[in-house]
Amino acid sequence: MTVRAIRVIPCLDVDAGRVVKGVNFVDIRDAGDPVELAAIYDAQGADELVFLDITASSDRRDTTVEMARAVAEKVFIPFTIGGGIRTAGDARRLLMAGADKVSVNTAAVKRPELVVEISREFGSQCCVVAIDAKSSSDTESGFEVFTHGGRIRTGLDAVTWAREVVRLGAGEILLTSMDRDGTKNGFDLDLTASVTSAVDVPVIASGGVGSLEHLVEGVTDGGADAVLAASIFHFGQHTVGEAKALMIDRGITVRPIG
Amino acid sequence: MTASPRPLIAILDYGIGNLHSAQKGFDHAGADARLTSDPGLIADAVGVVLPGVGAFGPCMSALHSKGLDRVAVERIHAGVPFFGICIGMQVLFTGSEEAPGVSGLGVFEREVGLIPGDVKRPQMQWNIIERRVDGHPMFAGLPDASWAYFVHSYTAADGPDVIATCDYGAHIVAAVARDNVWAAQFHPEKSGTVGLRILANFVETAVSHQAEST
């Protein structure tokens, strides 16, 4: 039997190299320190980490490179950095500093060749394309790609765009439902299933997780290869270990913790 | 020259992608790991590592442009403990379906091909290392069903030197070893405590090899 081990991925928002948006663990010394948080999630059994860089001003982006270097020195599981990557040079600096993958979103919509450039130079395996999608009656699949954190519509069909970025060289898709993001109502399973069945690269489901059951549904109903969540882990509501225990209980293969 | 308290491990620096993690992993495992393309420094190292991310063709051409293809083969023939990781494992073979016409280093005399079957490529996940032989020092101190992180679309052909496989549609090669050469398809530097143990096992093997040969 083929091992298809579903990855559980906590996502951390970082601003100028510091983790923001209320991570709230008991016993944490510095809730803003990406290295300390990464180590905690590693110890909990996280399979990967995603850092979403929300640094507004581009002249402070060097802090993100420094963060990649600091995390890579202490934490030995894969991590992805997304946000603000506009050129292959931006990607190169993060990868050389120790990030395993970079995730591109708006810049890829503006200039799809960026996906070709990153995948050709560094390999598809480190080129993640993040797709933010919302329900829309204007597209064939019923889902449209949005950029700029869900503010700007592109007219692109999310499923068609997913196929296109894979053709261009994306090795993975980070798929976020902007309808569900922040709602705690669970993944948009129609969106997830539409994309996972359309592409042959791994898909990370994101947006809307409010309970551990939602993570299970993302895999069983959405067909996701990995599930990403933020708040349920950050506020100490659940550990990654608890998520994995439930998934194992539901017959999903995951890397056991410990 | 005074002996370094930490054994020198040379990480071959061919300038592509994330080689930093391998260096930090070996540092963490007790070595003085240096990213280098300096043949003198490489010759001083007790062990040599060819890390890798990316594609077969660009990796071979980067190695060649820095002369590191010759240095690697020379170190292997000198009997120095050598560890190829991911694409650094694949280039130890004669060639790859990923880059037709590009010659690998030919340490293992067979080819690398696309992962077979109706599976997602790349395999981008943790998987169980299934050992084919008992007692190889790569896995010393690790439980039988240890998990490691894989990211690859191509896989080495099976052969007598395969020491571990993983189950991904078919049993595909996870690690090979012959004499002083170790190679892993997975990324020990990204496989948490399991991976760090494997890196420490290599450092230990390299140190005892040096002790035996001096």
Image (cartoon, coloured by chain):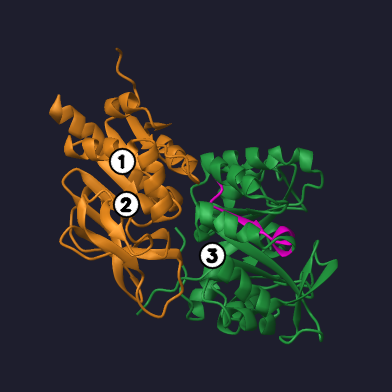
Q: Colour of chain A?
A: green
Q: Circle 3 is placed at which residue position?
A: A171
Q: Circle 2 is placed at which residue position?
A: B91
Chain coloured orange in this rendering: B
Could you tell whether A252 is left or right of B81 in the image?
Answer: right
Q: Circle 1 is placed at which residue position?
A: B69
Question: Of circles 2 and 3, which is in front?
Answer: 2
Question: Of circles 3 and 1, which is in front?
Answer: 1
What chain letter is assigned to the residue under label 2? B
Q: Amino acid at mark 2?
A: Val
Range of residues picked out in magenta: A98-109
Q: Which labelled disc corresponds to residue A8?
A: none
Q: Position of residue B61 (x, y in %)?
A: 39, 46
- Element carrying mark 3: loop
Comparing B148 with A231, the one in front is: B148
Residue B72's place in the image compared with B144, above or below, is above
What chain letter is assigned to the residue under label 3? A
The residues bearing labels 2 and 1 have C-alpha atoms spaced at a distance of 9 Å
Identity of the residue drawn at 34% across and 61% down = B100
Q: Position of residue B71 (x, y in %)?
A: 28, 35
Residue B180, magenta (yes or no) = no
Q: State whether discs 3 and 1 lie on one chain.
A: no
Identity of the residue drawn at 62% across and 69% down = A165
